[in-house]
Amino acid sequence: MDIEARHEVSVDWKGRPCRNNKHGGMRAAVFVLGIQAFEIMAIAAVGNNLITYVFNEMHFALSKSANIVTNFIGTIFLLSLLGGFLSDSYLGSFWTMLIFGFVELSGFILLSVQAHLPQLKPPKCNMLSAQNICEEAKGFKSNIFFIALYLVALGSGCLKPNMIAHGADQFRKDDPQQSKKLSTYFNTAYFSFCFGELIALTFLVWVQTRSGMDIGFGMSAASMAFGLVSLVSGIFFYRNKPPQGSIFTPIARVFVAAITKRKQVCPSNPEVIHRGHANPQNHVNSINRSHDSAPYANKIRYTNKLRFLDKACIKTQDHDKESPWRLCTAAQVEQVKSLILVIPIFACTIVFNTVLAQLQTFSVQQGALMDNRLFSGSFKVPPASLQSIPYILMILLVPLYELLFVPFVRGFTGVSSGITPLQRIGVGLFTVTFSMVTAAMVEQKRRESVEPISILWIAPQFLVFGLSEMFTAVGLIEFFYKQSLAGMQSFLTSMTYCSYSFGFYLSSVLVSLINKFTSEPSTHSGWLSDNDLNKDRLDLFYWLLAALSILNFFNYLFWSRWYSTSIQPDAEYVVDTNGEEEQRIAFSKEGANETGTMV
């Protein structure tokens, strides 16, 4: 069941209405792809090698270092909610990216200064030496480090949802031809992300290893500066969505109106609820037709669950004009429903991102204990560069997916993107299990080997994860963006990144709980409590994550089916709009009579 919502309005940088032949499209989106590539290049070079710096330079214990990294990355993704809210409500995507891009840049510069000056770090010490008792960073030194780190987190977190949303906004959702390009754009955006990650995990990590972390952090600052130049360069071509005011006010109104009218009776026929009459051809509602001449309409679908919220649309005849806190539009009700219905889908991707957290922490330390020499010892692979393996794979697979897989599968499914976003997420959630199975087997082999095994043994776990991420990450972003109405794209996209946040926080919680429940009373040492992986049981931790991943996949199958059955497939419903006056669907107080009027 489709519901017409508020028409999308886009303006240029001066606030004038956009022209289709001048603004938007891939020509504008390429500048957004530029800042996305440069920003991920900057943040990935820091985040993916951060555990090495925190452990070796700041002298935090290994488990504490892992938690610092996962908390930092988790905070980045949690702050994406703030970025989405500010963009949709007050600033717009462009200005949110510009402001917080400079915040992130200042954090990189401060990190570089802190890493360069010896007086801002504890004395040098070998953390792996049993004879040394290294001084942990405390006080002013620790404060400077965390201030710089969380300036980066604030800037990056507020940028991330807006880069995706602003790029997607360049394609008109109310134009079927441009709407079909959205899936291609999301695949291209993921290709840009992979390219940035690859440069970060090869060249920038190599610079950090050879020249020091101060130079490495400085390179991240330079990369961020190039990203801001790319963003500003496209200012004349962007389609900008004006902010709509607080996005939480309409949501709150729906709940208040539904609770206030909780004693009202909704008509039993959902077609009547949204049309006002049982006969689809009999339009007894007074519908404004001022937009009928428009070639396209922005629609959302009616959901047959959470019908308690439909009571927010029932008009009581006690007052000629009801407050918006007592009578809501049907589009507002459906938007609130969609927000609630996607929460289980969102929750099912948290364990997936907990697996990602291991590849950026423990797997890096795992590689540090392996033989990293290649080509007869003439070249050594930095352990952090192992994380480039999935992105090398993705740079090869994403074009093949778009050019070969999608057209081939489209012939069987009839879906323009080959498979639906929900199906794409499911494929990724299933395959990620094998990443942890592979990781556990490799760690067991490493522990049992007398001599260090080749670092190439660790490659399969990264390859399998990269394949699963291509399905889950892109599918999740596309799914959330397509659920949003005009004015909430950035916020709903930010929920995608919240999944990363909760995944990394869950990793920290799991590490702490595992150490607590596996520690022996005599030694007080658990699976992950030592600074030496040769003494820890990382392999058992990986097996635990493999079990959680397969259970999570079956949980996802249940909730994805539940979500799919919530959509009303065969009825039609139109709520038309006229400028700032959006019509409200209203029902008589005698709701059981299944009659109503549009107001």
Image (spheres, grey):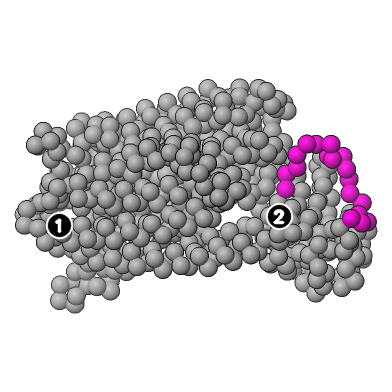
Q: Is residue 501 above or below residue 31?
A: below
Per the rendering, the mark at residue 15 is none
| Horizontal relation, residue 322 to residue 192: left or right | right
Which residue does the image show at 34% across and 68% down from the upper left?
A: 547
Q: Amino acid at mark 1?
A: Arg
Quarter of the image for residue 350 reads bottom left
Q: Is residue 403 visible?
A: yes
Tell me which segment is drawn in magenta.
Answer: 281-299
Q: Position of residue 382 (x, y in %)?
A: 20, 40
- Disc 2 to disc 1: CB gap under 8 Å: no
Regarding mark 1 in the picture, which secondary structure is present there?
A: helix
Could you classify mark 1 by the number of other residues whose Cα lies within 10 Å: few (under 14), some (14-19), or many (20 or more)?
Answer: many
Which residue occupies the foreground of this view, 245 or 488? Answer: 488
The residue where tag 2 is placed is: 301
User: Quick check: is 559 in the magenta stretch?
Assistant: no
Per the rendering, the mark at residue 446 is 1
